[in-house]
Image: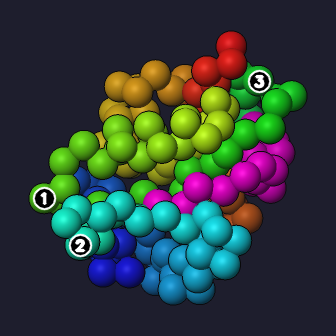
Amino acid sequence: MDVLEVAKEVMRDAGNKQQWVNGYPTREAVLADLECQGGMVVEDDGVVVAYFAYLPSPEPTYSRIYNGAWIDDSLPYHVVHRIGALPSAKGIFSSVMDYCFAHDPNMRIDTHRDNKIMQHLLEKHGFAYCGIIYLANGDERLAFQKCLAQ
């Protein structure tokens, strides 16, 4: 959880003040990730430097997409949520993507409109912007997909 708290501060400093608010991600969300074997950590010399959730489809909030379409809506996919890293850890997103695509060629991810850092990383790693999804609480997110099977 310390990594995620630091990640929140990094987002705030980068101008993203609307994502990960009101205590999110909660300890309960992380425990749920871990319970279904989807909570992942990245370590450097035995120190946790990053956390992410790697969860199998279907993702309920991805069942409807607005102002666009998924690249492929017929294949199973995995979702990456809650990526957070210590600022001193370099290349984390690349490492996370290497791990994820080694296990599934079809990946979806969403992010807040203000999360310019994540949008840049997604573009850099070949994700395509697909449209808008809405979280269960009604919050808007930009949705992306990369499908190596295409």
Residue 78's image quarter?
top right
Q: Which residue was labeled with disc 3?
A: 72
Give the x, y percent position of residue 58: 81, 50
Q: Which residue was labeled with disc 2?
A: 47
Please give the name of the residue rendered at 73% of the width and 27% of the height, measured from the top-left corner: 70
Is 97 on the left or on the right of 38, as rendered? left
Is 125 on the left or on the right of 110, as rendered? left
Q: Quadrant of the N terminus?
A: bottom left
Q: Is residue 127 visible?
A: yes
Q: Which residues are magenta?
A: 52-65
Give the x, y percent position of residue 90: 19, 48
Please say whether residue 67 is one of the residues in the magenta stretch.
Answer: no
Task: Say which label, 3 or 1, has the lower sequence index.
Answer: 3
Q: Bin the neighbour count of mark 1 within 10 Å (Cα to Cα): few under 14, some 14-19, many 20 and up.
A: few
The kind of residue tagged 2 is Val
Tell whether label 2 touches label 3 (CB within 8 Å).
no
- The residue nearer to you, when weighing 16 against 109, is 109
38, above or below 1, in the image: above
- The residue nearer to you, when weighing 126 against 115, is 126
Secondary structure at numbered mark 1: loop
Q: Which residue was labeled with disc 1?
A: 88
The span from disc 1 to disc 2 (Cα, nearest Å) is 12 Å
The span from disc 3 to disc 1 (Cα, nearest Å) is 36 Å
Q: Is residue 133 visible?
A: no
Please give the name of the residue rendered at 56% of the width and 51% of the height, measured from the top-left corner: 80
